[in-house]
Image (cartoon, rainbow, N blue to C red):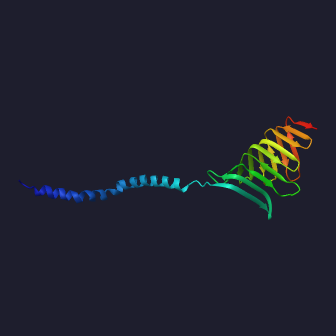
């Protein structure tokens, strides 16, 4: 058996020459690998950096005050947000406007959407607006908290002592008490 030392030396030289060759030519291929790996990490960072901030609260009572005086108290069985906290969703909301004790007013519905930046509460599903002497029912109602006005572009029914008014739109100014029922208005008096 003859041992070829030349072959062994060449193969052992290859053992250290191969990694050296990889390191020497690394500048040629390293940029592509780094770019590829950075794309992956940037995608991962962008998805983790934009984590959704949502919440859910049960049996909530929200109060809004102006110049130290409570203006509105909002009760809901559940309040939650989805993607952002600029839009809140409410289940079974009841809003009590407590600004003037002589003019109590409450609004309730099956659900509501509160746009915090626009300060608009949209109540849905069997909405009732109740004052000291009047009940207004509709399917959808928007309360503009900043302007203290209520609007509905849906069919509306207004019931008071000895009077029933129906129409297809409604506007109510909470400050001065003006209201308007529009389009196909029917008034029954007794």
170 left or right, relative to 111: right
Q: Is residue 98 above or below residue 180?
A: below
The answer to whether residue 12 is seen in the rendering is yes
Give the number of marks.
0
The one nearer the camera, 104 or 42, is 104
Camera-nearest residue between 34 and 51 = 51
Residue at 50% across, 56% down: 45
Of residue 79 and residue 151, the one placed in the foreground of this image is 79
Q: Quadrant of the C terminus?
A: top right
Q: Is residue 153 above or below residue 56?
A: above
Question: In the figure, is residue 190 to the left or right of 78?
Answer: right
Residue shown at 65%/55% (left/top)? Answer: 57
Image coords of residue 29 (percent x, y): 36, 53
> Residue at position x 24%, y 58% from top?
17
Q: Quadrant of residue 168?
A: top right
Residue 58 horizontal/vertical position (percent): 66, 54
Q: Kindly tell me whether residue 87 is visible in this rendering.
A: no
| Of the pair 36 and 76, the residue shown nearer to us | 76
Residue sticking out furthest to the bottom: 68
Pinpoint residue 42: horizontal percent, then vertical percent.
48, 54
Height in image: 31 above or below 157?
below
> Residue furthest toward the right?
190
Which percent across, then down, holds residue 18?
25, 56
């Amino acid at each position: 058996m003859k041992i070829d030392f030349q072959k062994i030396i060449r193969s052992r030289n290859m053992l250290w020459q191969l990694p050296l060759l990889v390191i020497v030519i690394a500048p040629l291929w390293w940029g592509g690998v780094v770019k590829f790996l950075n794309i992956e990490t940037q995608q991962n960072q962008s998805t983790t950096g934009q984590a959704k901030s949502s919440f859910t609260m049960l049996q909530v009572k929200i109060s809004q005050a102006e110049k130290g005086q409570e203006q509105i108290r909002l009760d809901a069985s559940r309040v939650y947000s989805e993607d952002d906290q600029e839009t809140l969703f409410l289940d079974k909301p009841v809003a009590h406007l407590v600004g003037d004790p002589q003019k109590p007013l409450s609004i309730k519905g099956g659900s509501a959407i509160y746009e915090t930046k626009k300060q608009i509460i949209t109540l849905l599903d069997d909405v009732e607006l109740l004052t000291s002497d009047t009940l207004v029912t509709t399917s959808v109602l928007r309360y503009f908290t900043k302007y203290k006005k209520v609007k509905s572009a849906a069919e509306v029914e207004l019931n008071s002592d000895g009077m029933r008014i129906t129409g297809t739109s409604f506007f109510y100014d909470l400050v001065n008490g003006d209201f308007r029922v529009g389009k196909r208005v029917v008034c029954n008096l007794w």
